[in-house]
Amino acid sequence: MIDLARMAALIAILTTGVVYGTDVFCAVVQRPALAHVDDRALTAVMGNVHLYGDRRMPVPGAVGIIAAAICAALAAVAGRWVGAVAAAIAVGLLLTWIVLYGRVSAPINRQLAAAARSGEVPANVRELQGNWDRIIAARAVLQGLAVAALCLTLVT
């Protein structure tokens, strides 16, 4: 049973790591780089990034949450309470990320994607991007803590 829990943890780490790495890249590289482009480029780049990202990133995100939940359940059944609690904490962190993404990031993503498709530059594009940037560090921290908690399940 514990081997299955560890396999689920490994799957959760790998898939959550995809989202974590993306958020860290956005916080560390993308955010400062976008400050140096004009509004048309900002709209086109970020609109298209969100157009593709919002279609493709839910897969690793969902697999990560499901695998973390399976890990928590299997670790609990195996009596590995530290691992079970760590995986459950990871699930909570990932669900918190989903709420933050859904309430702040996703609506902005849709607006920028629509603007990119239409070729229009919203008058408030910098404000939109600023609001998106405002939570990217928090999103990265949540994902990083979830990965760390899942790693703990592998050593307990």
Image (cartoon, rainbow, N blue to C red):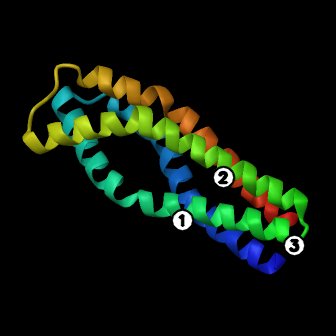
Query: Alpha-carbon distance for marks 3 and 1?
Result: 22 Å
Residue 14 is labelled as none
Q: Earlier in the sequence, mark 3 or mark 1?
A: 1
* Residue 76 appears in the rendering: yes
Q: Which residue is mark 2?
A: 91
Residue 13 left/right relative to 21: right
Kind of element beneath mark 2: helix
- Residue at 16%, 26% in the rendered image: 122
Residue 4 horizontal/vertical position (percent): 75, 78
Q: Which residue is mark 1?
A: 63
Tag 1: amino acid: Val
| Image height of 140 relative to 16, above or below | above
Kind of element beneath mark 3: loop
* Residue 35 appears in the rendering: no
Residue 102 horizontal/vertical position (percent): 43, 39
Residue 138 horizontal/vertical position (percent): 57, 33
Tag 3: amino acid: Ala
Q: Which residue is mark 3?
A: 78
